[in-house]
Amino acid sequence: MIDESIAQSHFISAPDGLRLHAREYGSRLLEATPVVCLPGLARTAADFDTLARALASGRAGRPRRVVALDYRGRGLSARDPKPANYDLRVENADILACLDCLGVEHAVFLGTSRGGLHILMLAAIRPASMKAVILNDIGPVIEAAGLARIRTYVGRLPQPGNWDDAVDLVKNVMGAQFTNLSEEEWLSYAMLTFEETGDGFATRYDPALMKSLEAYDLDQPLPTMWPQFEGLARMPTLALRGENSDLLAPETVEEMARRHPRFEAHTVAGQGHAPLILDEPTIQRVCAFIAQAAA
């Protein structure tokens, strides 16, 4: 799945010693502003492979270094024996440790869902590191209905017997959100969700992640992050929203545009939470934004 000719893995120690994984595309010697990609809750660095190859090859004006991270318990990062550490604050410290180790002083930051929440936190902690921001189907207001849906399947997916089963399973879970994927794209989605192991198929994340969602009381209004979002006002910001998303409402995107003087938005047709960034129109839009926003 990963093009090894232009990508390499790095393994980094978290502040508590857990082994973390980052995927790097392109050379550190490239002069263009690099891009840091942060995945969603149960997603991995592999989600960004198609976009990262496009950026590393020069589609965003000049060839760019891309760093995509696996949070603890996801992808090639080690699983944490303490599920309570699957926490935004712990993961945010991990991200900073990875960036410091890899020598990323400033970058364009792209965050999918949970990755966007990390961006909002980083903007308060280390704002000078951000040249521009892309929020993929996440904003200051999270819709409870979307979070409730996510809670029904994270850590609860049955084990498929083969790749056909895996595709059928992903279709059953995500079909209402993604209404125009090709069979090839569904297979890609399945391969980004599951992996083959010596014991059969498994998710690419620790099923104990489900515990990180149990703390939310969905009968109460979820806290908003408008002050954190307004902290992005000095930097160009692009929001991607899946047309069928139940986590980021159109009204929230409209309010984001009202509050942010350098804000742009792009709707990904036929996709929900969160857009896969595999379709050519979205890749073109992201590359054009980065080319204009960051030298």
Image (tube, rainbow, N blue to C red):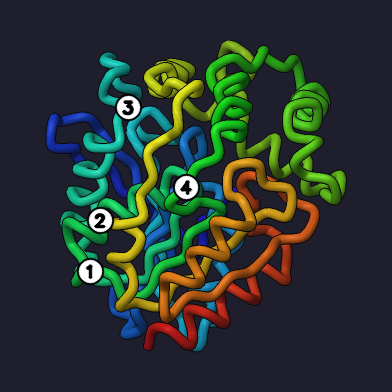
Q: Residue at x 43, y 32 (%)?
A: 74
Residue at numbered disc 2: 122
Whole-number angstrom distance, CA of label 2 to CA of label 1: 9 Å
* 226 left or right of 289 in image: left
The amino acid type of the residue labelled 2 equals: Leu
The mark nearer the N terminus, 2 or 1, is 2
Q: Residue at x 50, y 33 (%)?
A: 42
The amino acid type of the residue labelled 1 equals: Ser
Viewer-nearest residue: 151 or 195: 151
The amino acid type of the residue labelled 3 equals: Tyr
The mark nearer the N terminus, 1 or 3, is 3
Q: Position of residue 274 (x, y in %)?
A: 61, 47
Q: Residue at x 82, y 26 (%)?
A: 168
The amino acid type of the residue labelled 4 equals: Val
How many marks overall?
4
**Circle 4 or circle 1, nearest the eye:** 4
Q: Position of residue 169 (x, y in %)?
A: 76, 24
SS under mark 1: helix
Whole-number angstrom distance, CA of label 3 to CA of label 4: 21 Å
Q: Which mark is residue 129?
A: 1
Q: Which quarter shows the C terminus?
A: bottom left
The mark nearer the N terminus, 2 or 4, is 2
SS under mark 2: helix
Residue at numbered disc 4: 141
